[in-house]
Image: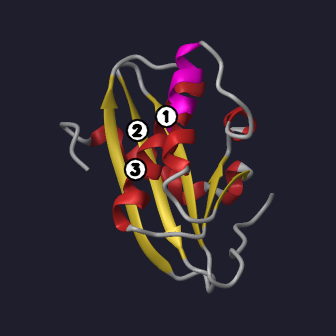
Amino acid sequence: MRKWEKPNEGWIKVNVDAAVFQDSIGCGAVIRDAQGVFMGAFCKKVEGAWRPREAEAIALKEALSWIAELGYGSCVFETDSKELMQACKKAPGESHFGTIVGDCLHLLKHINQVLVQFAFRSANSVAHELARATHSMSDKGE
């Protein structure tokens, strides 16, 4: 079992995850600073039938939009999807997944310093629980 680790001094860490339901997905993200102090959380329900890899990409896209709105720089984004992490390091493909990753890459350019890295699910549990909590939301509210 792996544990959450603090980012370097001057950086924040944003853990991101998605949960797939029958007719929607849940996106969850949590921000912590270099001391591990909670700075904020986000969850959103997105209607539609999505596959897990697209759901993970949508969750990252939503988190990137949220962080860009907040104006943070020097961010580490952690996802428990190795496929998504690897896709963010190369040109996106032609698939629906590739289109969403392309949107993520565009948003990444609007953050001063940014890393996207893999986190084991056990180190990403808070974001996962936020994503799962959206299942009980009655609308697409944040």
Q: Which mark is residue 139?
A: none
**Marks 2 and 1 in Cβ contact (< 8 Å):** no
- Viewport quadrant of the N terminus: bottom right
Identified at 21% across, 45% down, the residue is: 141
**Mark 2, residue position:** 26
Q: Considering only order in the chain, which callout, 3 or 1, is on the residue closer to the N terminus?
A: 3
In the image, 39: left or right of 108? left
Q: Which mark is residue 103?
A: 1
Residue lying furthest right: 1
Q: Is residue 5 magenta?
A: no
Q: Position of residue 41 (x, y in %)?
A: 40, 63
Identified at 54% across, 50% down, the residue is: 109
Q: Is residue 96 magenta?
A: yes
Q: Position of residue 36 (x, y in %)?
A: 60, 80
Q: Which residues are magenta?
A: 95-103
* Label 1 residue SS: helix
Q: Nearer the viewer, mark 2 or mark 3?
A: 3
**Mark 3, residue position:** 65
